[in-house]
Image: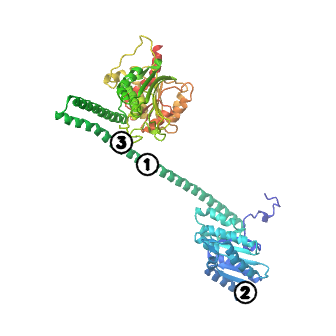
Amino acid sequence: MIQDKPGDVGAWNLAPQTDWRRMSDSEHFVQFYEADVFLLNSLSGFIGTAINSGDGALVVATGAHREGLDELLRANGLDLISAKTRGQYVSLDAAETLSKFMVDGLPEPRRFTKVLGNVIESVTDGRNSVRAFGEMVALLWAEGNYAAAIRLEELWNGLQKNYSFSLFCAYPINGFSGEQFVEPLTGVCTAHSRVIPAESYADLVNHDERLRAIIQLQQKAKTLQAEIRKREEAEEELRASLVREQIARAEAENANRMKDEFLATVSHELRTPLNAIMGWSHMLRNDKLDQATMARAFETIDRNAKSQAQLIEDILDVSRVITGRLRLNMGSVDVASVINSAIDSVQLAADSKGIQLEVTLDPSVRHTRGDSNRFQQVVWNLLANAIKFTPSGGRVEVRVERANAALQVCVSDTGQGISAEFLPFIFDRFRQADSSSTRAQGGLGLGLAIVRHLVELHGGSVQADSAGLGRGATFTIRLPLAVDKKPGKTRKKRPENPWSPETTQRLAEPLHYVRVLLVDDDQDSLQILATMLSGHRAKVQTAASAAEALQMLEWYKPDVLVSDLAMPGEDGYSLIGKLRSMENLKHTPAVALTAYVRVEDRTRALSAGFNMFVPKPVEPNELIAAVANLAEPELGQLEQA
């Protein structure tokens, strides 16, 4: 803060007006220039004053600059021949001098001190002061050897500690064009005690003009910085896009590889039973087999035909899963009966390997709602898998127990286990821990993918755990418990085919008491879904955004929430997260609707807190069945009331 006399205009003259005349006899300053004429005029005054005063003068410059300087000095009446003869004025070629102390692209300190120290000492020779001009740094800068230029400036500073002289350095300003020179320019300025700007600024003699020029330069600098930031952001986005493209390409390549491996496996697995069937059929036609061999032939054909039928059914089930056409015949399921039937199917395989099957059942949690046949398929898949991967003499255990408000079925074994690397992908279709031609176990690797989808259709979840290879595995299924009903309050028996016209008509009955909050940002989807559910006698409230739904939840308690996932502003994942944090609504069943139907999308939705996942375009009966399944406990309570 200036506190001098207000009338002192000089105190307010803050614009820099430096040039070489203001430098002391020991300064090391740098002059930037746009044209050689400006440099030579400034340099002729600096060197000419020294010669006129009887002081020493040293010039290390390019040939063109040395000739131009000498011409100006002679034009000002200086006798250069006499000055050079006396040793007062020494003029050296910059490139030649530079070559005497450069080693591996950098100035070597001892050589530099020897070469330039001797010259400075000879020019001094009893004189009061020495003025030197060095252009070697500009040559290094022009070559792009910026580190060497900065290092040479530092060596000049070190030389001034042993010899008394002022040093004039010069750089063409166009050598610093571009944002990449911001830090190098700072390094050059730091190496000098004073900095003189180029002529476009130095030619301004009025302090007001200089202040205005500074403001313009500041504005340009701010603009340049903003442009640099935008460019950096654009470059970062390009890098991120490139990374995303590389990830997507890797995923696509991995998907193609898995598809090819799967098709090869399908071909192998379908041909293997065909080989036995065709071989024994050919031998039976020859009618040359004894009774024992014929019995063996019929047994082998029957076993391989069933194996192939199971393979085909698995492929069809996966196709139904992918297209969303897998349907359930919902009803009461006796879990104990289902497990016993599944064990009967695998008992022979277990006995042949000497595997002990153990079943532990809590009788209070033996009922759930679902499709008995499909649930038996789930248990059979898990048991068959456990027996397949458990060595002879091992043990497979099935436990049915209560887990909070859910029915839990655990199938554990003492088999080969699952590696930590493969465990996250155990339920993915087209994935196998070993898909090589030397694998020990056959199969398509679709069973667990089907298990997961069937369990999720039942409103449950399944997870796999393993301590590692050779340490067994445990598969845990959690399903909602069936609600006990008062005697006499039984529901009408439904037809076996839930997708027949009769069933579609009667699906209205289980939605009669159901309160549904429907959330979707697309008005057309919202209207058709609301009409669909209302047509089946559900009480529907609609919201066009997550924020609107949260406001509605302050006064409306739905039996089931049906929400789209992809919505602007706040999506369905955020909505379900907030719902699960509300004490009075955290157990509200929820159905996720989305056009994103990848495996990871389904997994993310269920992990976020949704109970079921229904892909778009929505099959009306699938959505109705999902809402009915999730609303079953509430309906049971209403019936009891």
Question: Mark 2 Cα within 10 Å, few/some/many (few <14, many 20+)?
Answer: some
Instruction: Give the residue type that dot 2 points to.
Output: Ala
Q: Residues within 10 Å of mark 1 (few under 14, many from 20)?
A: few
Label 3 secondary element: helix
Q: Do we see residue 140 in this rendering?
A: yes
Q: Secondary structure at mark 1?
A: helix
Which tag, 3 or 1, sits closer to the chain's start? 1
Tag on residue 250?
1
Q: Quadrant of residue 441?
A: top left
Q: In the image, is 245 to the left or to the right of 300?
A: right
591 left or right, relative to 349: right
**Residue 545, horizontal then vertical, whole percent:** 50, 34
Question: Gap between marks 1 and 2, in whole Å?
Answer: 75 Å
Which of the 4 quarters of the picture holds residue 39?
bottom right
Q: Tell me, yes or no, whether the two marked residues, 1 and 2, touch with CB atoms within 8 Å.
A: no
Left/right placement of residue 192 relative to residue 403 reads right
| Closer-to-camera residue (10/33) | 33
> What residue sits right under mark 3 in the picture?
262
Sequence order check, earlier mark of 2 and 3? 2
Q: Judge whether 70 appears above or below 578 on screen.
A: below
Can residue 327 be seen by looking at this rendering?
no
Query: Which percent across, then down, holds residue 102?
Result: 62, 74
Mark closer to the observer (3, 1): 3
- 1 or 2: tag closer to the N-terminus: 2
